[in-house]
Amino acid sequence: MAITGVILIGFVIGHLVGNLQVFQDPDHLNGYAAFLHHLGPLLWVARIGLLLAVVIHIWAATVLTLENHAAREVKYGVKHTIQATLSSRLMRWTGVVVLAFLLYHLAHFTLGFVQVATFKENLQLYTMSGDYRVAGFPVVKAGAEVLDVRTMVILGFQQPVVALFYLVAVGLLSLHLLHGFDSLFQTLGWRSEKWARALRAIVIVFCAAYFFLNATIPASVLLGRLKVAEPVHPAAQR
Ligand code: HEM
C-alpha cells in the first residue's frame, strides 16, 4: 500500500502543479496538455503504471480490511474510539468516493462523455500564440493547433453541480491523504515518538494546501474569477 501510495501521491501533486497553469494565459495549460499528448508511447507507459498502482492499492486495502475483520470474529459489544482519528476511520469511504470521482473525472475530461453538447458547441482547436517550453526547449511551437483544454475545464466548472462535486471530492481526497501520509511514515519507520508531532503538523499543512490549491480552480470558475479567454483578434496582436 505504501509504495503504490507514494506513486499516487506523486501523481496527484504533479497533476495539481500542471493544472494550476489554468490561471495563466491559455498557451500554458493548452501547451502543457499538448506536450503530454505528444509523449505518445511514454504517456501510455505512465497511464498503465498509474492504473496498476490504483489496482494494487485497492487490492491491498481489500486484503487488509478482510484480515482485520477475520482477526476478530465476534464484534465488539461496545465501541469507543480513543485514539483513531476521523480520517483514519473514514479511510474506506473516502477511498470509495475518490475512486468514483476518478471514474467520473476520466469520463468528463479525458473521454468527453459528460457535457457532450456543451463541449461540442463551444470547443474549437486553440492556436498557440507562443512556444510552450519545458526546461527551455520549445516542445509545442507557436502556431500549433492544439486541444483547448483550458476552455474545457472552465466550461466544465461553470456547471455548479459539477464544480461542487469536484470540491467535495478533492476535500475527501485530502482527508484520505491525511491518514495515508501518517500510515506511510509508520510503514517506513519514520514516525518515532520524537518526530510524531512534527510529522503530523507537516502532513496537516500539506493536505490543507493540497485541498486549497485544488479547490481554487472550480471555486474561481464558480465565482466568475476564471473565465474563458476572449479570442485575440489578429489586428490587436500587432
Ligand atoms: C480541480 C481539480 C482537477 C482538474 C482541473 C483536473 C483536470 C484534468 C484534465 C483537464 C484532464 C485531461 C487532460 C488531457 O487529456 O489533456 C485530467 C486528467 C486526469 N486527471 Fe485530473 N483534474 C483535477 C483533479 C484530479 C484529481 C484530484 C485526480 C486524482 C484523484 C485526477 C486524476 C486524473 C487522471 C488519472 C487523469 C487522466 C490522465 C490521462 O489522460 O492519462 N485529477 N484532469
Image: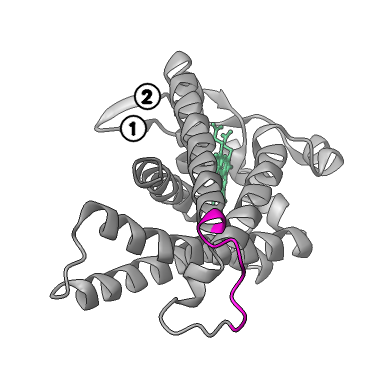
Q: Which residue is mark 1?
A: 133
Which region of the structure is painted magenta? Answer: 69-78
The residue depicted at 34 percent of the width and 64 percent of the height is 182
Q: Amino acid at mark 1?
A: Arg
Q: Which residue is mark 2?
A: 139
Report if the CB atoms under discs 2 and 1 are less than 8 Å apart: yes
Residue closer to the observer: 182 or 162: 182
Residue closer to the observer: 178 or 144: 178
Q: Is residue 21 above or below residue 89?
A: above
The residue depicted at 64 percent of the width and 66 percent of the height is 168
Asked if residue 233 shows in the view, the reply is yes
Q: Left of 97 or right of it: where is 25? A: left
Q: Quadrant of residue 201?
A: bottom left
Local crowd size for mark 1, using a 10 Å CA cut-off: few (<14), some (14–19), many (≥20): some
Q: Secondary structure at mark 2?
A: strand
Residue that lies at the very extreme toward the top in this rendered image = 41
* Prevailing secondary structure class for the magenta stretch in the rendered image: loop
Q: Quadrant of ligand 1?
A: top right
Mark 2 → mark 1, Cα distance in angstroms: 6 Å
